[in-house]
Image (cartoon, helix red, strand yellow):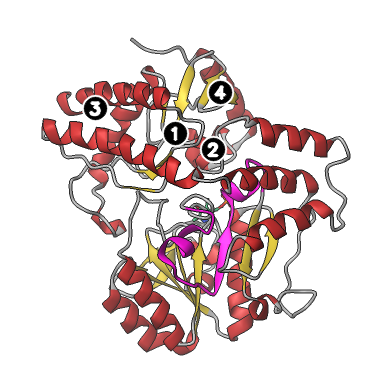
Amino acid sequence: MSIKRENSARLFEEAKQYFPGGVNSPVRAFKSVSGPPLFIKKGDGCIITDEDNNDFIDFCCSWGPLILGHNNPRIREFVIETVKRGTSFGTPSQLGNLLGKLILDNNQYIEKIRFVSSGTEAVMSALRLARGVTGKNKVIKFDGCYHGHVDSLLVKAGSGLATFGVSTSAGIPESFAKETIVIPLNDREVLSQTLEEYGNDIACVIIEPIPANNGLLLQDASFLEFLREQCTQHNVLLIFDEVISGFRIGFEGAAGYYNIQPDIITYGKIIGGGMPVGAYGANKEIMAHIAPDGAVYQAGTLSANPVAMAAGFATLQQLLLDNFYPFLEERTKTFARVIQEYATKKGWELSVPHIGSIFWINFSTEKISRADQIDAANMEKFKILHHELLQRGVYLGPSGYEVGFISAAHQNQDLGQALQAMQESLEIVFNSK
Ligand SMILES: *Cc1c(COP(=O)(O)O)cnc(C)c1O
């Protein structure tokens, strides 16, 4: 049994003539799973349809933004209504105010916000802001956190515990990588030693408080609290990169979930409701450093364009409805628990860490909170799982390091169907040698 992928295969061959690797973002190329990438032609609710007319229950949800599922009627209607009046004016607009107010009225962790057009741009700007505010240059990041393709953050640890970064991409000057210090997650000792030693040169520590780009590396709440205290003590700004966790774990994201006040928060993904939007926010004093109020320059031709603001507004408004988050979390918990119980009964090396509406299929029973605890050899199992799930109408992001997302459009019936497919597929993963 194998689903037809002829049209996707043909389109992919064509795309290779136009785009490097046939794609406009690398992980879409299906390099770590089998077959050509699926060319999706439409999405509705939790279902996506490819160019060969296969339907899939989608757990990638455009990598996170679609917390309401595909083609949400209220987002669609508001976007269409807005686009009829033009797409971008390069001026302020009332829709920008509307979204800004909605966010700030319902988030006690930031007082002002600046909209940009992607998560990467939000992070890049937040780093500049932290450097502008502190007058210091170096940045601490954690191994296993992704912050977009910002030069100085595409780095990994060199040898040793707390070390200056080595770039993970060609085209990044060594001098940039050297401004970044990479340390392991969830390790208080290395953190405090590093701040002790380099604190005077460090502008900020950046973390995904819920690291969800390299598996789901849930941190101890006490570690995040310790991180907050240490940053304050060393006069270092704390940036929560909430491009995934923002509006996902609750309207106030991970800051609200853990009740920790970072100095700067970055957003992306959900904030744009499927349109290209990112943002960063902080208290009024810190945000006063941004141009035109202050000396930190940051600008954008299409920033806060009305169409993107409309999509964001129509999305976030729905997230504020009563019980939106508890409901989604409950469904996710049940989904993860059923897989977990099945695996445990079978004695398989598998666990399903989850938080809010994020889950991860982890081919290990160990609790994992650091990147170096993931065994790369297990990705072979994921490859089989991904393939078998596709055959059964379920789409996961095409890498075992990616998490899955459950949207409000995933009904119990869809989840039941996906669980059935998951059990059959895992049976094959664990019984094929
Ligand atoms: C996706 C992501 C980014 C980058 O956002 P883009 O919109 O892809 O540029 C940055 N940080 C985190 C935590 C992300 O998940």
Vertical order, 207 against 3 (above or below): below
Could you say which disc has been placed on residue 13 in the image? 4
- Identity of the residue drawn at 24% across and 55% down: 373
Could you say which disc has been placed on residue 62 in the image? 2
Instruction: Please tell me which of labels 3 and 2 falls first in the chain.
Output: 2
Vertical order, 377 against 100 (above or below): above
The answer to whether residue 179 is left or right of residue 195 is: right
- Identity of the residue drawn at 52% across and 67% down: 152
Spatial CA distance of label 1 from label 3 is 17 Å
Region in magenta: 250-276
Instruction: Please tell me which of labels 3 and 4 falls first in the chain.
Output: 4
Q: Which residue is mark 1?
A: 59
Q: Amino acid at mark 3?
A: Leu
Of labels 4 and 2, the one closer to you: 2
Of labels 3 and 4, the one closer to you: 3
Q: Amino acid at mark 1?
A: Phe
Question: What secondary structure is found at the residue carrying circle 3?
Answer: helix
Question: What secondary structure is found at the residue carrying circle 4?
Answer: helix
